[in-house]
Amino acid sequence: LGAKWGVMNGPPYPLGSGDHSSSEKQAAAAAGVKVGSDSGKGSIENVKPRSKSPKTDEEKREAALDAARKGDKKKIANRIMILKEEQGCDLVVVSLDWGDNKTQPGAGQIVFGKDVIDAGADIVWGSHPHVLQPIEEYNGGIIYYGLANFSFGGNHFPRDMDSAILQQEIIRDVDGTVRLGELKMIPVSITSMAVQNNFQPTPYEEGSEEYQRVMDKLAGLWHGRNLDVSY
């Protein structure tokens, strides 16, 4: 492909440590790809409201989220500009640790994800929720709101074992333009056992009830419980 791509771990929370960036760079170097990475600092959960004395906890939270979005959008836009214009990256992936452990993303999460795409990101890769959340195409980019657990050692008996592997096609056109292509979604269980997590992700059989359940969750068509799974 010969494309340069940038990975940015940014607000609302920094995702992972330098070890992640190092492994990403090593894997990309082996494939002849230059990786631009950046880590953000701060948490929208810890930003104090700037509005005048919101009355309820929900109003306080929304005020804090709004203040954080405004500040973080500027920081993210600047970092995306650096990756694309100064470092020559053709594709920028912004990885965010955000949201709650629910099967539907929160309103603030949706707004923030779209803000990041509008700021120039191609892919927003969300983590933190221990359950799957939908995928949304928006303004030429794509938002993975939450990809759940994968090889997860934090719980032997999680309430939700659904997960997915995503394979995102990247296309370079004849004029040199890089764009997103087909997205392949592979529904999996985080375990190969029926009732216990053995940390061995296993694909669901295509056409099975479990397979379709995962596809519905990723498409935003899931009508089951909006699980609040706490770990």
Image (cartoon, grey):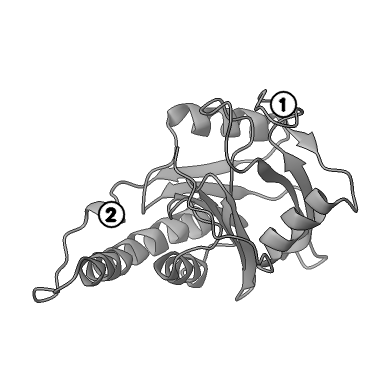
Q: Residues within 10 Å of mark 1 (few under 14, many from 20)?
A: some
Residue at 69 percent of width and 69 percent of height = 221
Q: Residue 45 has which mark?
A: 2
**Image quadrant where one finds the C terminus:** top left
Under tag 2, what secondary structure?
A: helix
Residue at 26 percent of width and 68 percent of height = 58
| 2 vs 1, front mark | 1
Residue at 58 percent of width and 30 percent of height = 157
Q: What distance separates the C-alpha of mark 2 from that of mark 1?
A: 33 Å
Residue 76 appears in which quarter of the rendering?
bottom left
Residue 1: image location, x then y, percent: 78, 49
Residue at 47 percent of width and 50 percent of height = 101
Under tag 1, what secondary structure?
A: loop
Q: Is residue 28 visible?
A: yes
Return the residue at label 1: 200
From the viewer's perspective, is 74 left or right of 185? Answer: left
Q: Is residue 89 visible?
A: no
From the viewer's perspective, is 47 left or right of 221? Answer: left
Residue lying at the far left in this picture: please name it. 53
Q: Is residue 54 above or below residue 131?
A: below
N-terminal of the two: label 2 or label 1?
A: 2
Number of on-image labels: 2
- Amino acid of disc 1: Gln
Q: Residues within 10 Å of mark 2 (few under 14, many from 20)?
A: some
